[in-house]
Amino acid sequence: MVVVVGAYAVFSLVGFGSALMASGPLALVMPVGKVIPMLALLDFAGSSVRGWHARKNVAWGEFSQLFPGMLLGQLAGVLVLSHMPTTLMAVALGLFVVLQGMKGLIKRTAQPSAMPQLAFAYGLLGGVLGGLFGSGGFVYASYLERHLENRVAFRATQAVLIALSTAWRLVLCTWVGLLNVQVALTAMAFVPAMGVGIAIGHHIDLKMSREQLFLLLNCLLVASGLSLVVRYLG
């Protein structure tokens, strides 16, 4: 419950990251194949509300460039998720989370803007990571941030992408048998924790700078991923 509270506090602040934050610790106590669809249910509940309120500010041009790749990528990711051995999947998930945390901790120089014709590739990569690991939001964000100067449009487009990608993931997880009544009931049990986390995110201490927030986030990602790898390899 504490992990879910923290994950959705981060989600409410940066628009993504709930699965990256929560999937590692949750996979220590439940099968990875159940963690991803359960978090997809929670993500859909949170992001659909935000997406609906922000729909008037969506940059539909950039959205339409990312959307087709996202659909195909999610299909590939969920199919792999349904057939990969549990131990291998858990270790892969842990290494993936550690990698994202380390990348966030390393100061990178400014990169040139991504070319619009690469939008399909960004959507495809984000979809695969979303279907396989439950989080492709940071891929969409990296593309949108380079193409949308308006922060309102950026947040609105990101919110709608996350809402639709989680909805599609739920359909795919149901199709391959990863989503069932037990997973849905487990997700419902976490709804209060998600609500508390979102409320905390909205009222977080204003003294925390953006740099401090992302430093905390990335440190937690590294710790979470390492704990999962050690648990399953041990």
Image (cartoon, rainbow, N blue to C red):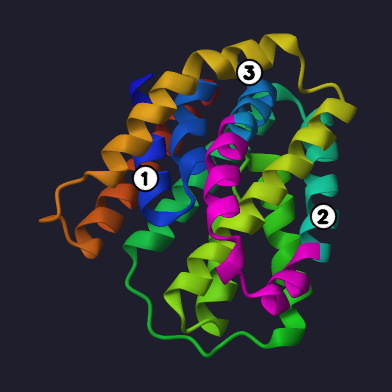
**As shown in the figure, which amino acid type bears the numbered disc 1?**
Val
Residue nearest the observer in this picture, 150 or 177: 150
x 73%, y 41%: residue: 167
Of labels 1 and 3, the one closer to you: 1
Indicate the position of residue 229 as horizontal and vertical percent values. Answer: 50, 31
Tell me, yes or no, if residue 48 can be seen here: yes
Q: Which residue is disc 3 drawn over?
A: 31
Question: Element type at marker 2?
Answer: helix
Residue nearest the observer in this picture, 197 or 60: 60
Q: Which mark is residue 10?
A: 1
Q: CA distance from mark 1 to mark 3?
A: 23 Å
Question: Element type at marker 3?
Answer: loop
Tell me, yes or no, if residue 140 can be seen here: no
Which quadrant would residue 212 be assigned to in this image? Answer: bottom left
Indicate the position of residue 158 as horizontal and vertical percent values. Answer: 57, 62
* Chain part drawn in magenta: 42-67
x 70%, y 86%: residue: 116
